[in-house]
Image (spheres, rainbow, N blue to C red):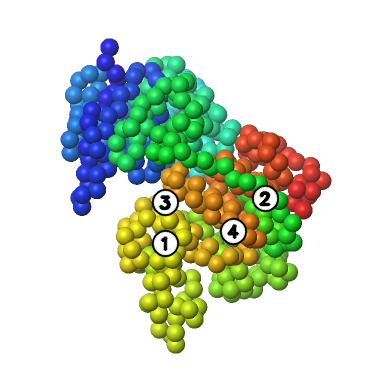
Amino acid sequence: MPPLLQAESITRIYPGGTVANDGVSLSVGAGEIHAVVGENGAGKSTLMKILFGLEQPDAGQLRLEGKPIAFANPREAIDAGIGMVFQHFSLVPSFTVYENVALGSEPRSGIRFDREKAIAQVRALSDQFKLRVDPLARVSNLPVGQQQRVEILKALYRDARILILDEPTAVLAPQEVEELFVAIRALVAQGRTVIFIAHKLPEVLAISDRITVMRAGRTVGEVATSEVTEKELATLMVGREVSLGVERSQSDGGRACEIDTVSIQSEAGVSLATDLSLNVYAGEVVGLVGVEGNGQAELLEAVAGLRSVTSGEIRLKGENIVPLGVLDRRGRGVASIPEDRLAEGLAPGATVAENLVATRLGDPRFVRRGVLDLKAIRANAIALIDRFSIRVGGPAFAVGTLSGGNMQKVVVARELAEQPELLLVNQPTRGVDLGATQFIWASITRARDAGAAVLLSSADLSELLALSDRLVVFYRGRIVAAFINSGDLSAETLGAFMLGLETQDETTMKAALR
């Protein structure tokens, strides 16, 4: 019996000569969970877009149940029974669940939309596949995990028998991940097939039956999940042995940053964070834990000077820096690696050399009598490119031409070119590969060991657990729990507080907040 879905020697070359897929092959059996893993730029997304009709290959063949197929657009893929759930959802927030699911394929009673039938169909699908969600709920009121279920329901509503899930766990708490896995297993138990794209290898090993590994646009291996370890999988992906372990800090430095009863509101007056109090010591990493949108990112922006606080103080080495602007805070040793490197951290059209001094244009080493010292700026770039292993043709290359991992290294290099007093880090390895992740973790750890106080926010709990000496959990704009990371703290424990399922007593929390 032939595989359900096959990609044979798929090649895709973009204008300009970039080879995204170079003879890639994939074979997915009916009723299995097949994971596709690889670093950024490995070609996973391009292959999935071809499977879903978003792009067409330059060479190669797709087969469905042994028969050659070609999709000119996603509608043809959907009609053939292939659905795709993207990492970034395409829901209408003001619509209800059933309206989002039925949109474009509405049941009719004559010429009118049959609302009751749509609600009944969505409820039946929700129950059948263990995707518990209220069809009448407004999507804007749903947590991220339930919004993802709505996206899956959209595909099932259109009778998808092959479901492609692109990085489905990227923004989920551990409990939501386990709920998703229950739903995925229910899909397979009822005859569906799942292609699971992910970079979190423990999750890949927990959910998949087989794994295809891609590297540099090629398929480099296919393995049964039961026959491979996480370390072996990482080596296949990168082409060399990779270790993401870090040494835990033993900080004996004094308080570097004190956040004292800080409250933050949006420009419209909506409360984003309330009465936040915590201390960060020199030589330690404090991880800010929470589902995105619960106040941790806003706190980092407030400390950096990018967002106003409505009350409270932020003290650096005893000085209240709330009245100070961004540049004055930088002058006192605040460095910041922002969440969105393209929107907030880089000027994509500017050169690598220019980006590496973008925050230091008042520095007499690079500006003399109001004129940029291009020779000094170039020399600075050459030194940092070497020190931070940035893969680029030279200082004059535009940052926008670099890979995501190397763009992030430019931000890290600029912020850590000189030792900071306080380092603010938000999503340091989002969208970067294992090799760049290893380097960025090591860079943060070196800054900590040299005496920096580090505030770290990440959607990846394994990253927070690996790097943080203490962890502070945010829920609905408040700190609800705090832990000293002694090595036995689990993602599941943190997840219970992230979702508001558990509460911590004040004494325990205050002891960990120090």
Q: Which mark is residue 385?
A: 1
Q: Which mark is residue 405?
A: 3
Q: Specify which label sits upstream in the sequence, 3 or 2.
A: 2
Q: Specify which label sits upstream in the sequence, 1 or 4.
A: 1
Q: Quadrant of residue 382?
A: bottom left
Find disc 4 in the rendering and name its residue: 447
Identified by mark 3, the residue type is Gly
Identified by mark 4, the residue type is Ala
Find disc 2 in the rendering and name its residue: 249
Compared with residue 118, is residue 421 higher up or lower down, i.e. above or below? below
Helix, strand or loop at disc 4? helix
Q: Specify which label sits upstream in the sequence, 1 or 3.
A: 1
Q: Specify which label sits upstream in the sequence, 1 or 2.
A: 2
Disc 1 from disc 4: Cα separation: 18 Å
Helix, strand or loop at disc 2? loop
Residue at left 63%, top 56%? 449
> Does residue 270 appear anywhere in the picture?
no
The residue most toward the right is: 507
